[in-house]
Amino acid sequence: MIGCLPVLLAIHPAYVHGTILYMSLYCSGLSMFSLLKREKIGLAVMVPTGLLMAFLSIGIVIHADHAGISVLKVLETWVHQVMDQVANVYTQILTPADMASFASQRPSYEHTLTRLMPAMTGATFAFMLWANLLLVAKVDKRLDLKHWRTPDIIVALFILAGACTLVVNPTLQALGFNLLILVSISYFFQGLSIIAYYLNEHQWSRMLRWAIYLLILSQFYIMIVTVALGLFDTWFYFRKRIQRKGEDI
């Protein structure tokens, strides 16, 4: 395929990372297109997210090998650099006492962010792909996202992730928290679908809908409620309960 020809640039060390970036976007786009043709909405987000994570992991491993350091050290360095930028901003807006408090807690923040970076990165990719899916759904009316549901089997992963966060082993805890974040993203999208269905059923104006969506995305606690809404929909099927009388989903 012509689209794969740029891969040949990888033979030059200077273009390795650029080639990995190109192939990650190329493969994720192809997989998303192929799955959407078969109306596999959930997989159209999950598979490209997995591909992007895989290519990113390859890039990190190559970078770590060239630098002669471990992958964990690469992640710790990146997190430290991000926190340096955050500290520069906080210096301008926080009082000296608050800044001292931030400085004392910064090592703990960096440790937590490093452990959760895989899930946070995957969640970011999933959000980007879901946003693309929303744009596609505006054109392809076959994709009715308002009725999308997470497969029931994912509840088992949610329970497993929660159990892992309760154990004493730090490795299992980190695995549990990462898995919990990734599974929660799926239920967050399901919660958004329920909200979209409700707003559509009751014919709320476009302006109010956008205001509600922005409020959800800007408030962490409302995002948690949205995740819970999606999770409990597994058992209660809220869309069936809020549909207008006489209509069938």
Image: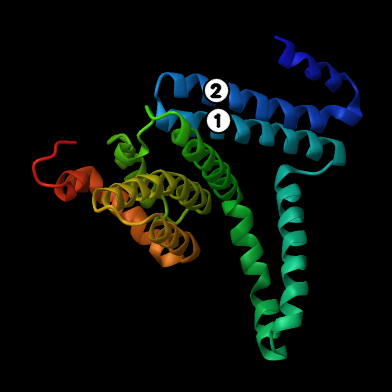
Q: Position of residue 129 (x, y in %)?
A: 54, 38
Q: Position of residue 155 (x, y in %)?
A: 30, 42
Which of disc 1 and disc 2 is earlier in sequence?
Answer: 2
Q: Which residue is drawn at 44% across and 28% down?
A: 140
Q: Residues within 10 Å of mark 2 (few under 14, many from 20)?
A: some
Mark 2 in CB contact with mark 1 (< 8 angstroms): yes
Most foreground residue, 80 or 95: 95
Q: Which residue lies furthest to the left in this view?
A: 246
Which amino acid is tagged 1?
Pro
Residue assigned mark 1: 48
Q: Which residue is drawn at 77% across and 60% down?
A: 81
Q: Residue at x 52, y 51 (%)?
A: 174
Residue 141 figure quarter: top left
Which amino acid is tagged 2?
Ser
Answer above or below: position of 37 versus 136.
above
Residue 25 figure quarter: top right
Residues under labels 2 and 1: Cα distance? 6 Å
Q: In which quarter of the image is the C terminus?
A: top left
Residue assigned mark 2: 31
Most foreground residue, 16 or 38: 38
SS at circle 2: helix
Answer above or below: position of 86 versus 100.
above
Q: Residues within 10 Å of mark 1 (few under 14, many from 20)?
A: many
Q: Residue at x 50, y 64 (%)?
A: 218
Q: How many marks?
A: 2
Residue 82 figure quarter: bottom right
